[in-house]
Image: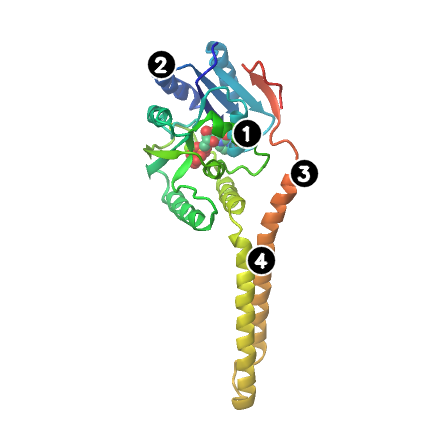
Amino acid sequence: MNQPIYSLVIPIYNEEENISEMYRRLSHVMEKLDGEVEIILIDDGSRDRSLNMIRELHQRDRRVRYLSFARNFGHQIAVTAGLNFVQGKAAIVMDADLQDPPELIFSMIEQWQQGYQVVYAKRLSRKKESWLKRFTAYCFYRILQILANVDIPADTGDFCLMDRQVVDILNAMPERNRYIRGLRAWVGFRQTSVYFEREPRFAGEVKYTFRKSWALAIDGIISFSRIPLKLATFVGLLSSGIALLMILLVLYWRLFDPVSPLIGFTLITIAMFFMGSVQLICIGILGEYIGRIYEEVKGRPIYTLKETGGFVNKTEI
Ligand code: UDP
Ligand code: MG
């Protein structure tokens, strides 16, 4: 097979109901593309028939290559692994559940050919996703924009096209906390967006549990902002200001209004709880950062592979 131009990177975690339909839709798209394509499927430790189906696809169509993790490492790590193995001149990252319409690839490629190194897909709407998900996502992206030290575009996920140059830079980044949409923005170069309506899942349950979404959100904020750390100093200053004010108030009451009910047990208890919680929150924020430093310092591999298919030149990581 010739060197591919386009590499599709698709993470898969228990998507047995979606794989066939995804491949069917992709086949139509690939027929119309102006260059060779490779599809890199990353099995993120699926427990259903996904891996078998991926192997079958690889047997049928040699453009399909795959990696299989020894356990579930999460979506961002799966995308990272896929990017490590990309051989094309442009990588296109998309989900396996057809929420990211493969047909949008054409518009992405058009922009790439015009000289943009990153073309990310921006969601106009999220049809039929729960209001809670829509609302939390809306708030999160706005908060991230205020906090982050790079401009991470709102309402964009990982569905994007990246030029080889950008992929090489991402691959050279040693960090383990991989908030890909943030790293992608951090890299720079010429970036643009294409718009799309986020379809509902083709089949199956959402694999991003609340816990995983929460972890991703915190990763995004902590990896790209030091403002939470500064917040601790700010809250500390504020509470010492309040304490000072209270000293003055208590002095005033002692001297001029000794029967005031506010002096005494209640006030002390409230102040104690207030200070205690402020301190614990600040320690918690510190913990988030220190925990990540610890993860980085350990320097373990980001993922473990138990099987690969279709890669000849790459040694296993
Ligand atoms: N995914 C994965 N590992 C995980 C969770 C999800 O590889 O631990 C994949 C999943 O198979 C899908 C994509 O990541 O291809 C997005 O997941 P999902 O559709 O559940 O999330 P959402 O659409 O809500 O972002
Ligand atoms: Mg999805």
Residue 170 place in picture, x, y as percent: 52, 32
Residue at the spot of label 1: 171
Scheme by which the image is coloured: rainbow
Q: Earlier in the sequence, mark 1 or mark 2?
A: 2
Q: Earlier in the sequence, mark 4 or mark 3?
A: 4
Residue at the spot of label 3: 298
User: Callout 2: few (<14), some (14-19), or many (20+) C-alpha neighbours within 10 Å?
Assistant: few
Q: Nearer the viewer, mark 4 or mark 1?
A: 1
Q: The C terminus is located in which quarter? A: top right
Residue 54 place in picture, x, y as percent: 50, 18
Horizontal arrangement in the rendering, residue 228 relative to residue 204 (left or right): right
Would you place residue 314 above or below residue 191 in this image? Answer: above
Q: Amino acid at mark 3?
A: Lys
Count how many numbered circles sit on residues in the image: 4
Q: Earlier in the sequence, mark 3 or mark 2?
A: 2
Q: CA distance from mark 4 to mark 3?
A: 24 Å
Q: Amino acid at mark 2?
A: Glu
Q: CA distance from mark 1 to mark 2?
A: 29 Å
Queried on whether the Cβ of the residue with tag 2 lies below 8 angstroms from ligand 1, the answer reads no
Q: Which mark is residue 282?
A: 4
Q: CA distance from mark 4 to mark 1?
A: 34 Å
Q: CA distance from mark 2 to mark 4?
A: 55 Å
Residue at the spot of label 2: 31
Q: CA distance from mark 3 to mark 2?
A: 45 Å
Mark 1 lies on a secondary structure that is: helix
Asked if labels 2 and 3 touch by Cβ distance under 8 angstroms, the answer is no
Q: Nearer the viewer, mark 1 or mark 2?
A: 1
